[in-house]
């Protein structure tokens, strides 16, 4: 998921996407523990996607607190 796509999401969509990515990452970790994944880079991509989503969510929350009039 690209940053432009993430910025286009609403706050509620961000929260839903975060939960989805975290669940997906957890299932990937479990699957990798049982038997090696065909593409283990997906683990890294999943962690990075969660971090991007959380960063955007935090940025919006900080923006709201610093600009309460908007």
Image (tube, helix red, strand yellow):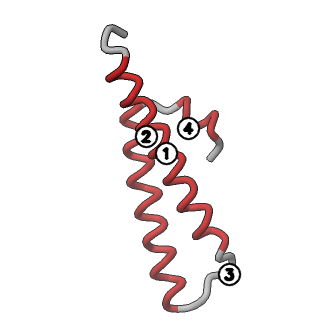
Q: Which mark is residue 4?
A: none
| Nearer-the-camera pick, 62 or 54 | 62
- Could you say whether the residue bearing mark 2 is in a helix, strand or loop? helix
Question: Which numbered circle lies on residue 38?
Answer: 3
SS for callout 3: loop
Question: Spatial distance from mark 1 to mark 2, Cα to Cα?
Answer: 6 Å
Quarter assignment of residue 63: top left
Foreground: disc 1 or disc 3: 1
Say above or below: 19 vs 32. above
Q: Which residue is mark 1?
A: 53
Residue at 55% x, 31% y is: 7
Residue placed farthest to the top in the image? 69
Q: Residue 42: which quarter of the image?
A: bottom right
- Return the disc, 1 or 4, that comes first in the chain's sequence: 4
Q: Which residue in the protein does label 2 denote? A: 14
How far, Cα to Cα, is label 1 from label 3?
A: 25 Å
Q: Nearer the viewer, mark 3 or mark 2?
A: 2
- Give the percent coordinates (x, y) of residue 30: 45, 81
Q: Label 2 neighbourhood size at 10 Å, few (<14), some (14-19), many (20+)?
A: some
The answer to which of marks 1 and 2 sits earlier in the sequence is: 2
Marks 1/4: CA distance? 7 Å
Mark number displayed over residue 6: 4
Around disc 1, counting alpha carbons within 10 Å, would you say few (fewer than 14), some (14 to 19), or many (20 or more)?
Answer: many
């Amino acid at each position: 998921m690209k940053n432009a796509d993430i910025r286009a999401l609403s706050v509620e969509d961000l929260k839903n996407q975060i939960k989805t990515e975290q669940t997906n990452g957890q299932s990937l970790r479990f699957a990798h523990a049982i038997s090696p994944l065909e593409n283990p880079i997906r683990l890294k991509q999943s962690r990075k996607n969660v971090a991007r989503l959380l960063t955007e969510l935090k940025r919006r929350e900080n923006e709201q607190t610093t600009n309460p009039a908007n």
